Image (cartoon, rainbow, N blue to C red):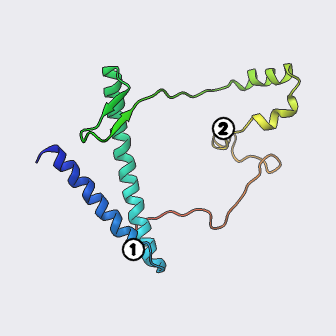
Amino acid sequence: MPRKLKMQDTVKKLSDSTEMLEKQAQTEDIDVLVDVGYNLNEIKKTCETLLNDIKTKVKGHAEENKVKQINGYSGRTMAKISQSSSTNIDPVGALSVLKKLDKLSMFETVFKVNVTDFKKYFGEPPKDIAEVTVVEYGSISFKEKKR
C-alpha cells in the first residue's frame, strides 16, 4: 500500500472514531459520557505521544538539513520550525536589582515559589506561608477499572 493511502486510511479511521464519540457525547447519560471521556482521553494520549515523536523527527530533520520549513506530502500542509527560548533569572541577582531600584516592595509580585521544588527539599510548607485552594470537584481523570 502506498504511504499516501496508508496515511489517508489512518486519518479516516481516527476521524470516524472521533465522529462516533462526538455523537455519543451528546447524550445526557452520565455513564455513557464516562465511557466516551475515557475513550477520548486514550485517543488524546496516543495522539500526544505520536505528535511528540513526529515533532522530534521533523526537528531533527530540519536541524540536520538547516531548513526552517518542510512541506507536507499532500502539498496542503507544512511544518514551520522556529526558535524557542526560555529565561532563568538568578533569584539572588534579581533581589539585588530590586534593592538597587528601591523596589523591594515588589518582591512578592515578581517572585514565585515552585511548590513542587519547595516540597521536595523542605517538605510541606508551613500554613503561615502557603495558601491552599481546594476545589472539591475540580479535577477529573478517566481510568479503566481494575478487575
Horizontally, is 137 left or right of 1 in the view? right
Question: Badge 2: how crowded within 10 Å, few (<14), some, or many (20+)?
Answer: few
Q: Quadrant of residue 136?
A: bottom right
The quadrant in which the C terminus is found is bottom left
Horizontally, is 14 left or right of 133 in the view? left
The disc labelled 1 sits on which kind of residue? Gln
Q: Nearer the viewer, residue 30 or 146?
A: 30
Q: Nearer the viewer, residue 68 or 132?
A: 68
SS of the residue under disc 2: helix
Horizontally, is 56 left or right of 117 in the view? left
Tell me residue 29's x, y (percent).
46, 80
Tell me residue 71's x, y (percent).
30, 34
SS of the residue under disc 1: helix
Tell me residue 56's x, y (percent).
36, 34
Which residue is the site of mark 1?
24
Query: Which residue appears at 31% of the width and 64% of the height?
Result: 17
Residue 146 in view: no
Residue 52 in view: yes
Above-or-below relation of 22 to 113: below
Which residue is the site of mark 2?
121
Q: Nearer the viewer, residue 85 or 95?
A: 85
Q: Nearer the viewer, residue 47 or 83?
A: 83
Question: Badge 1: how crowded within 10 Å, few (<14), some, or many (20+)?
Answer: some
Tell me residue 80's x, y (percent).
40, 32
Q: Quadrant of residue 11?
A: bottom left
Query: Which residue appears at 38% of the width and 65% of the height?
Result: 39
Alpha-carbon distance for marks 1 and 2? 46 Å
The disc labelled 2 sits on which kind of residue? Tyr
